Amino acid sequence: MKLIKSIVRPNKVDDIKDALDRIHVAGMTVTEVRGHGRQKGHTAVYRGKEYNVSLLPKMQIEVVVADEMLDAVVQTIITAARTGEIGDGRVFVLPVEQAYHIRSGERDVI
């Protein structure tokens, strides 16, 4: 199993969710996060005063998939999230050794 963590633009979450539904990926966790990469934030004006916004709002999407689904899911996320501009986000893949259902205590087989 693999955990896919994606940091994406907030307006792309629904596109990614719909794309994952089309390839029959069920279950995802979405979290509001803040951060920056190459973008380094931007300058904003509030009540006539300029200030630097260094941590931009992003969304983190987490999906656990079977190893054989990994490439398809990663490509689906990248395709759905891409705008071609700086700040589109990142995708990280981590190994998952075990998973359990809390209600039953059974080990999960994905």
Image (cartoon, rainbow, N blue to C red):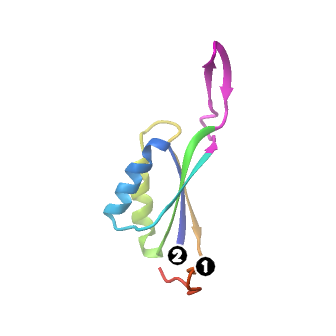
Q: Nearer the viewer, residue 33 or 79?
A: 33
State the extent of the magenta-drawn residues as a range.
34-55
Give the distance between the C-alpha atoms of the residues marked 1 and 2, in whole angstroms.
7 Å
Residue at 44% x, 49% y: name it: 13
Residue 1 is situated, as x and y percent measured from the top left of the image, at 52, 75
Give the residue pinned by disc 2.
1
Residue flagged by tag 2: what amino acid is it? Met
Residue 20 located within the stretch drawn in magenta: no
Tell me whether circle 1 and circle 2 mark residues in contact (CB < 8 Å).
yes
- Compared with residue 20, is residue 40 higher up or lower down, i.e. above or below? above
- List the single residue furthest toward the left: 22
Residue 76 — which label? none
Residue 11 is situated, as x and y percent measured from the top left of the image, at 44, 42
- List the single residue furthest toward the top: 48
> Where is residue 39, by image quadrant?
top right
Residue at 49% x, 83% y: name it: 109
Residue 110 is situated, as x and y percent measured from the top left of the image, at 47, 79
Residue flagged by tag 1: what amino acid is it? Glu
Q: Earlier in the sequence, mark 1 or mark 2?
A: 2
Residue at 43% x, 55% y: name it: 77
Residue at 59% x, 74% y: name it: 96
Residue 43 located within the stretch drawn in magenta: yes
- Compared with residue 43, is residue 38 higher up or lower down, i.e. above or below? below
Give the residue pinned by disc 1.
97
Helix, strand or loop at mark 2 = loop
- In the picture provided, is 50 more to the left or to the right than 19? right
- Compared with residue 10, is residue 23 higher up or lower down, i.e. above or below? below
Helix, strand or loop at mark 1 = loop
Q: Nearer the viewer, residue 31 or 103?
A: 103
Residue 67 is situated, as x and y percent measured from the top left of the image, at 47, 75
